[in-house]
Amino acid sequence: MLVGGITLDNIQGGVSKACTVGYWMGQPFARHGYMSEALQASVQHAFTVLDLSRVQAGCLPENAPSRALLEKSGFKYEGVAQSYLQIAGRWRNHVLYANLRRDRRGRADGN
C-alpha cells in the first residue's frame, strides 16, 4: 500500500534554478507528519543536491491542510493563479507558494 507521493517537477536550470513540488497523501496516513518530513527532505534536496534557488507549490484555495503544510514547511504565499489547472474537466484557481533558498522576504535589515 502506498502512503503517498511527492515529486519535484519542471526543474529549470540556467538563470531560473527553480522547480515545482507536488504531493499527495493517502487518507489513512494523513496528519501523521509523513508529508511534512517528505516535503522538508525534498526541499533540502532541491537546494543542496540540485542547487536550485526556488521551490514552488500550488494548491486549491479551499485545501486548508495543504496550505498549512506549506506554511509550516517554510513556504510563503505569493498569490493566486487564475485557471491554473484543469481538475475533473473544470479549470481551477490555485494559491501559489514558494520556498526560497535565500529568502529575504519580510527582512528590513538589508542583510
Image: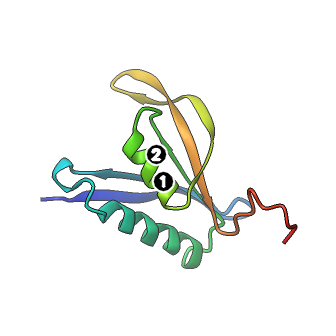
Quadrant of the frame with the N terminus:
bottom left
Say how many tags the image has: 2
User: What's the distance in space between the residues labelled 1 and 2, CA to CA?
Assistant: 5 Å
| Viewer-side residue, 57 vs 51 | 57
The vertical placement of 24 against 33, above or below, is above
The vertical placement of 45 against 14, above or below, is below
Q: Which residue was labeled with disc 1?
A: 70
Residue 10: percent from the left, percent from the top? 54, 54
The residue lying at 47 percent from left, 26 percent from top is 92
Label 1: few (<14), some or many (≥20) within 10 Å? many
Residue 59: percent from the left, percent from the top? 46, 40
Report whether 91 appears left or right of 12: left
Quadrant of the frame with the C terminus:
bottom right
Q: Secondary structure at mark 2?
A: helix
The residue lying at 45 percent from left, 68 percent from top is 40
The residue lying at 26 percent from left, 57 percent from top is 4
The vertical placement of 108 against 45, above or below, is above
Residue 18: percent from the left, percent from the top? 62, 59
Q: Are marks 1 and 2 in contact (CB under 8 Å)?
A: yes
Q: Which residue was labeled with disc 2?
A: 67
| Type of amino acid under label 2 | Arg
| Viewer-side residue, 32 vs 94 | 32
Residue 63: percent from the left, percent from the top? 40, 38
Disc on res. 91: none
| Viewer-side residue, 46 vs 99 | 99
Q: Secondary structure at mark 1?
A: helix
Label 2: few (<14), some or many (≥20) within 10 Å? many
Residue 106: image quadrant is: bottom right
The vertical placement of 87 against 59, above or below, is above
Report whether 24 appears left or right of 28: right
| Type of amino acid under label 1 | Leu
The residue lying at 59 percent from left, 33 percent from top is 81
